[in-house]
Amino acid sequence: MTSITDLPVWAAVIVCLLVLAGAIFSLIGAIGLVRLPEFYQRLHAPGLTTSGAVILVSLGSGLCFALLDGRWIIHELLIIVFTLITTPITLLLLGKASLYRDRTEGNDVPAKIVLGPSIAEAAVNRLPELPTE
């Protein structure tokens, strides 16, 4: 393995930008996880940013080691693939488990939280009028 100082300047700049962008994505997801008020809303912040952060950091790592060692970046590609497969499935199962628990315990789960305000309003507006006697 060669030293990191042997990395060309253009490649070092690209690697730094990729890793920095991945760190910023991860920070945004962490802030969203802390700041959002409801559990269902908290699922979105890490779900959207985790995959992007892992992809960017893995691409930076892959570029660095591909140029330094001249090796294939199979490990980084596997990390990206497994993250893209497991993150949405995990968040979907967490959301469904929470929704099931809320419904079985009789907790009120407004449609605005689960569906989002615009979808909930559209669904309510499409309901037929009830006959009045």
Image (cartoon, grey):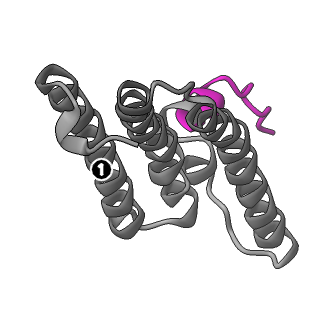
Between 107 and 38, the residue placed more toward the observer is 38
Q: Position of residue 18 (x, y in %)?
A: 28, 33
Q: Residue at image x 54%, y 47%?
A: 47
Between 13 and 18, the residue placed more toward the observer is 13
For the C terminus, which image quadrant? top right
Q: Residue at image x 76%, y 70%?
A: 102
Q: Residue furthest front?
A: 2
Residue 6 belongs to magenta span: no
Q: Residue at image x 15%, y 29%?
A: 13
Q: Position of residue 65 (x, y in %)?
A: 41, 35
Question: Where is mark 1, residue-wise?
Answer: 23
Is residue 15 positioned above or below 95 on the image?
A: above
For the N terminus, which image quadrant? top left
Between 69 and 58, the residue placed more toward the observer is 69
Q: Quadrant of residue 122?
A: top right
Q: Residue furthest right?
A: 104
Q: Which residues are magenta?
A: 120-133
Q: Identify the secondary structure beneath mark 1.
A: helix
Q: Left or right of 83: which side holds 89?
A: right
Q: Please name the amino acid that badge 1 sits on.
A: Ala
Q: Residues within 10 Å of mark 1 (few under 14, many from 20)?
A: some
Q: Quadrant of residue 82?
A: top right
Q: Left or right of 122: which side holds 8?
A: left
Q: Left or right of 8: which side holds 131?
A: right
Q: Position of residue 50 (x, y in %)?
A: 48, 47
